[in-house]
Amino acid sequence: MAKKNHPKEAYYFSHDKNAHSDPKILKLRKEYGWQGYGIFWAIIEHMSDQNDYRLMHEGTESFAYNLIIENDLLERIIKSCIKFELFVSDGECYWSESLNERMKIKAKKLKEKSDAGKQGATARWKNSEKKKNAILSTVNGSAIQQNSKGKQITGNEIKSESKTYQMEEREIQKRKPNELQDGESIYEYRKRMAENQETSDM
């Protein structure tokens, strides 16, 4: 049964550049010439389209028609390929051990490539999730921040308040350097002053 190939998988299987001078191929060429060599590769291509890379001995007529050759010639070439050990047969099907090995290597490489792609996608997804969680954590943490008047602020308001605090902090450091404790922010300074004021009012 022929398999359904993905468009990207239908274009390639490995082929030795010196295959024409292989001793077994030379026997085939001696008997059938370059026509036999071409038909041999047409058979290999047809095998590679099958799920198990095997072809049935029966029903070669349509394949011969597709190659525009007599069915008798196709059957004789198949038998010769088996005789020259280019193909292996169990009486019902025939196949190429060389093709099987090459397709196994190809399948292994495709799997490794697919696994690497999945791992990369997983890593990218995890990094994306970390960034998203970091942003959400920042936003959620900012949502409970308060400005100098005790009003909750978020988003752009936080950035605006931060700039204001920095300016006022520099101003306080200039005017009242002794009142600002080491490392104390303008927000912390104001909070401390407010707490002191509440204590004095009690």
Image (cartoon, rainbow, N blue to C red):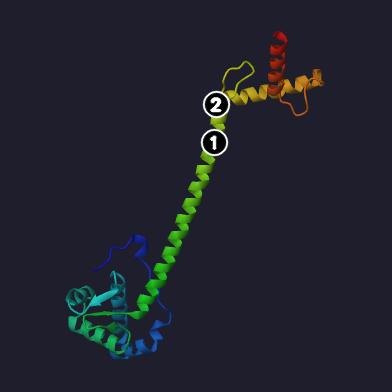
Q: Is mark 1 on a helix, strand or loop?
A: helix
Decide if residue 153 is on the left or right side of residue 26. right
Amino acid bearing label 1: Ile
The percent coordinates of residue 15 (x first, y second) are: 40, 76
> Residue shown at 35%/76% (left/top)?
100
> Residue shown at 38%/89% (left/top)?
23
* Mark 2 in CB contact with mark 1 (< 8 angstroms): no
Q: How crowded is mark 2: few (under 14 residues within 10 Å), some or many (20 or more)?
A: some
Q: What element carries label 2?
A: helix
**Among all residues in the image, which is located at the extreme front?**
202
Marks 2 and 1 sit apart, C-alpha to C-alpha, by: 12 Å
Q: How crowded is mark 1: few (under 14 residues within 10 Å), some or many (20 or more)?
A: few
The quarter in which the C terminus is drawn is top right
Amino acid bearing label 2: Ala
Decide if residue 140 is on the left or right side of residue 178. left
The quarter in which the N terminus is drawn is bottom left
> Residue shown at 77%/25% (left/top)?
181
Q: Name the residue under label 1.
A: 135
Decide if residue 101 is on the left or right side of residue 140. left
The percent coordinates of residue 193 (x first, y second) are: 72, 16
> Residue shown at 82%/21% (left/top)?
178
The percent coordinates of residue 157 (x first, y second) are: 58, 23
Q: Report the front residue among 149 and 59.
A: 149
Q: Which of labels 2 and 1 is toward the front?
A: 2
Lower sequence index among marks 2 and 1: 1
**Among all residues in the image, which is located at the extreme top?**
201
* 12 up-or-down from 35: above or below: above
The percent coordinates of residue 179 (x first, y second) are: 79, 20
Would you identify the image quadrant in which residue 165 lies? Answer: top right
Q: Report the front residue among 157 and 182.
A: 182
Q: Name the residue under label 2.
A: 143
* 1 up-or-down from 114: above or below: below
